Image (cartoon, rainbow, N blue to C red):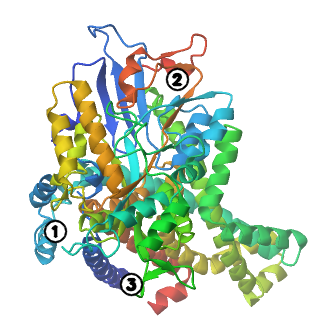
Amino acid sequence: MRRLLLSRAAQAAVVIALVATLAFVLIHVAPGDPFSASLDDPSVTADIRATQRAQWGYDRPLPQQYVRWIANLARLELDALELGWSHTHARPVKEVLARRVPNTLLLMATALGLGLVAGVALGTWQAARQGSRSERASGALALLALSAPEFLVALGALGLFAVRWRLLPVSGMVDPVLHDGLSLAGRAADVLRHLLLPAGTLALLTTAAVSRFHRSAMLAVLPEEFVRTARAKGVTEVAVLVRHALRNALGPVITIAGLMLPALFGGAVFVEKIFGWPGMGLTMVNAVGGRDYPLVLASVLVGSVLVALGGAVAEVLAAVADPRVRGAA
Amino acid sequence: MRTSAFALAPVGSGPFRFVKWEPRQRLEIAAVESFYRGRPVLDRVIWSYAPEMSTLVQKLFAGEADFFDMVPPPSVPEAASHPDVRLLPRGNFDYSFLQLNLFDGPSERPHPLFADRALRRALAMGLDRRALVRSLFDTLGHVLAGPFVRAQWSADTSLAQLPFDRAAAARTLDSLGWRVGPDGVRTRGGRPLAFRLLYPASSTNRKNMSVLIQEQLRGLGVRVELDGADNNAFVARGRARQYDAYFGGLIATPSPSGIRQTWTSDAAKPGGFNTGRYLNTAFDAQVDSALNARDVASAKAYYRAAYRIINEDAPAIWLYEPPQVAGAHRRLRTGPLRADAWWLDIPAWSIVPGTRLSRDSAAAP
């Protein structure tokens, strides 16, 4: 297990370094810079923009800018870690990330958690009722959810739950008027109310994907001899499914969950935009649009680390669930 | 200045004090009890941000927000029929135009098409600007009458315009030697009458109007190739003068003197806003005279003369002033909204008695 972890950590470090370098080059060769966004304003003259560029070092050759960026990153003490200044947020990048990353983690963890639990439950249920009318109907619904563009699902949920029935708030992460005056429990409930729609939308899509994979995995496991033996011993059907078949069928689901992390990170952009959730996806898109170089690069770094971590966790969990994987590693 | 601690937590002497700013989330101000002209009626005002226009409108419709300063045109009919919302049209300083590059890209060579004043005028006359604006904004938009907006004191909407007259435009092009070919596109000496129109792909209004312009000019025998670019690329290429026609948008200054930075020869220098390089000393002289005039009446006369010259020269086709319509919940009492600062009268805004919600009583931190 230790060797597995070390090998995955080394691979992840190389991938993160490559992704960050590629992001650095691509964002700098894209047209525009952090100060070109203000060009519709006649009061910002070319001289002012040139001064601003020089002040931030964006007029220097690209390799020199890259070396400076790496040198700043290489200060390994976390307190001294220099990620730069966010031009679009008018704050240090560290501060922006400190606010946004937890929001994304909350959204992703909730969506992934709900989606995995519901998807595994649905997949197990479908496998147990293979061929029945209800299994076919639920399979068709899952396929429909999987095929529907996520922004459509999000807009539909918003229209129904927030605008028509007014059960949940339209957007944001907290009530901007009341939140600060609430008790701790009240604040948590406030965040939960705001979380339900975006997390529910993402969870619905995750559920659909996971259920299809898990159903197939369960169908492959159920005819196995150890399941037949359990049934022959008089173990109840629920126990057969949950205690014997489920664990053996979890491998693909864990792998898929790890692979879904990048998709969820990117897919969350639409959901964050529609529900106004102040997370990393939207921050990154806005930063790219505003050519906020420091924030784009820091976001890419954080995103790569999260995705690498997600992959590593998925591998470890798969190894825990299935000793054959451990052996192979 | 933007990066200073003061800019992040400003202190002023107005009717409200700064409470909190979370970039791209919210901005909060609270009433100053001891303000010398009397305490504002509202206790707190909170700007709430959402990245999606449709979401912002839904906040207003759902009663989560009391005021939205910019209801997008497609949502105006729904807002107008919403029982809790009233619409408040307001002036603004934005305007959009089709800038024609008078030179061949960034070079010093005259543009093969747009250096010709008569051709530029023919193109302007070949466009039914009223229909374009109506198609895009219904009755909410206004056709631009020159390089100025109606909210500026120098505005003169009675100014003579190049009329929409497709037959006259076609005759002019014929007389210039641009003859309609078998494919419907005019040519002269083997060169088709075709140009590329650069627009920002992120702007739905400009994208849609580009398509309409392409269609209208096609009827005149002019081929327009649409060239949508991401906003940064659009701006960079505009700045570098790498375009034939550029779908520009500007925010005019409340004072008409801003025209010096946008359309005079001074503004045609590298880095200036006059990227199409319209150069006319008579126009420059009128603008200078307007800027140095000692009274409003003479300044207005000089501006009028300047506008007339630039309209006659047609270095750009003036398209529209986008509509600005605010939406307010009926429980909110507002005054008239100023074009240059709709928020200026907020201290006098109030909630209609008997319509207060529980959230109105939440105290400022």
The answer to whether residue B155 is seen in the rendering is: yes
Tell me the residue at 60%/22% (across/down): B330
Disc 2 versus disc 3: distance between alpha carbons?
54 Å
Q: In screen coordinates, is B146 left or right of A212?
A: left
What is the quadrant of the C terminus of chain A in the image?
bottom left
Question: Which chain's residue wears label 2?
Answer: B
Q: Amino acid at mark 2?
A: Arg
Question: Which chain's residue wears label 3?
Answer: A
- Residue under numbered circle 2: B359
- Residue under numbered circle 1: A69
Secondary structure category for the residue under label 2: helix
Viewer-proximal residue among A217 and B195: B195
Secondary structure category for the residue under label 1: helix
Residue mark closest to the camera, 3 vs 1:
1
Q: Amino acid at mark 3?
A: Leu
Let me know if marks 2 and 1 both belong to one chain.
no
Disc 2 versus disc 1: distance between alpha carbons?
46 Å
Q: Position of residue A42 (x, y in %)?
A: 24, 48
Tell me the residue at 46%/49% (across/down): B51
Secondary structure category for the residue under label 3: helix
Looking at this rendering, what residue extends furthest in the right direction?
A133
Looking at this rendering, what residue extends furthest in the bottom direction?
A328
Q: In screen coordinates, is A198 left or right of A177?
A: right
Q: Position of residue A132 (x, y in %)?
A: 89, 74
What is the quadrant of the N terminus of chain A in the image?
bottom left
Q: Position of residue A7 (x, y in %)?
A: 34, 85
Let me know if marks 2 and 3 both belong to one chain.
no
- Residue under numbered circle 3: A4
Q: Amino acid at mark 1?
A: Trp
